[in-house]
Amino acid sequence: MKLITAIIRPFKLDDVREALAQVGVSGLTVTEVKGFGRQKGHTELYRGAEYAVDFLPKLKIETAVSDDHLDVAVEAIINAARTDKVGDGKIFVSTLDQVVRIRTGELDDTAL
C-alpha cells in the first residue's frame, strides 16, 4: 500500500478528483496549504504598491492506494494537474505499513 501526496494548483482540484475517480481511487483528503518551490513566490501590485508573495496558495491531496493501483493513480494526477508552467506542483509516494478502517476493523487493502 502507498500514500500518494500531491501538491497542486487550487484550480486543478476538480480535474484531479475526476481523473482519480475514473481510475478507481475512491477517497482522498484535501488540505489548503501555502508554500513555494523553484519559483520562490512572485511580486504583485496592489493599489500602486508592489509587494512580495513568498508563499503561494496550493492544495495538498492525500490518497491511499494499493500497490497495483499506484502507477495509474500517479499518471492520472500528472495528466490532470499539468499546465506545463512553473509551479504545477509535486507528487510524493510513501509506503504505508498498515491501514485500519475504524468502523469495521478491516486491515490493509480491504480497509482501502
Image: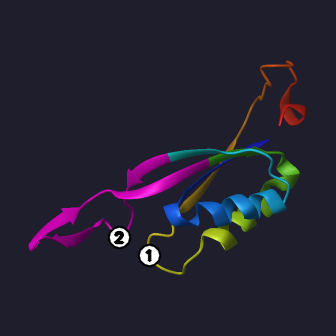
Q: Is residue 1 above or below residue 46?
A: above
User: Residue tagged by mark 1?
Assistant: 86
Q: Is residue 11 above or below residue 66?
A: below
User: Residue tagged by mark 2?
Assistant: 39
Residue 15, how many percent across, how many down?
Answer: 66, 66
Residue drawn 54% across and 81% down?
84
Residue at mark 1 to residue at mark 2: CA–CA distance: 7 Å
Residue drawn 35% across and 70% down?
39
Residue 2, how many percent across, how many down?
Answer: 74, 44
Sequence order check, earlier mark of 1 and 2: 2
Residue flagged by tag 1: what amino acid is it? Val
Q: Callout 1 environment at 10 Å: few (<14), some (14 to 19), or many (20+)?
A: few
Residue drawn 47% across and 48% down?
32
Residue drawn 26% across and 59% down?
54
Is residue 98 visible in the rendered structure shown here? yes
In which quarter of the view is residue 46 placed? bottom left
